[in-house]
Amino acid sequence: PVFSSSLPVSRLGPSNPTSASTSHTTFAKRGMPVTIFPDPRIQPWRPPSKDSPGISLRDARIDLPRLVHLINDSFDRQLDVPAYLERVDRRIAGVIIAGEYEGGALLTWELPPGIDPDSPEAEGRWVPYLDKLAVLKRSQGSGGVADVSVE
């Protein structure tokens, strides 16, 4: 997004990466399979760079038609797929799928306003942003698909 109230503007300041404590979150009820791309146990999520351009939703591991159906059903409107793909292509931080595309989250790498993604100033300022959180209508309120908690 060009502007988001939840995107930390403080990232405009000097870039001094520090180790931050992490918290574990749960996305789905116990027993429901959760698939994460890229799998953080194998490859940590990293912002796009010249050496690593980032993930595309056209990646073979992602079932794009099912993902689009999930978003359309959840938001009760048709996603402009070409425009959305153009906006997020190579800026995907991660994709989280609950069950058989019953729920999902799309996280994108974003910069504070006014930072050119190709500038040296962008390094260290990318933040993962929850771009879409969708749950199939038939699974909404089913007690688990969209539960998010911090341990």
Image: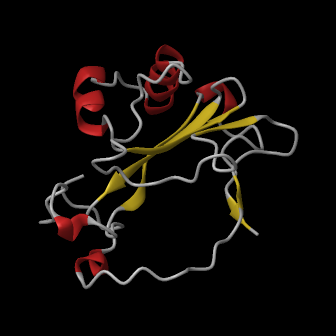
Which residue is at the front of the view, 34 or 37? 37
Q: Hey, which quadrant is residue 63 in on the image?
A: top right
Residue placed at 34% from the left, 63% from the top? 126
Q: Residue furthest front?
A: 51
Return the residue nearer the eye: 96 or 41: 41
> Residue 1: percent from the left, percent from the top?
24, 52
- The x, y position of residue 130, in whole percent, is 45, 52
- In the rendered structure, the answer to whether residue 58 lies left or right of residue 25 reads left
**Residue 34 visible in the snapshot:** yes
| Residue 81 place in picture, x, y as percent | 30, 22
- In this view of the protein, which residue sits in the foreground, 8 or 125? 125
| Relative side of 35 to 67, left or right | right
Q: Determine whether 54 is above or below 121 in the image.
A: above
Q: Residue furthest right?
A: 31
Please identify the quadrant where the C terminus is shown. bottom right
Task: Write the residue at 46% across / 24% down.
Answer: 59
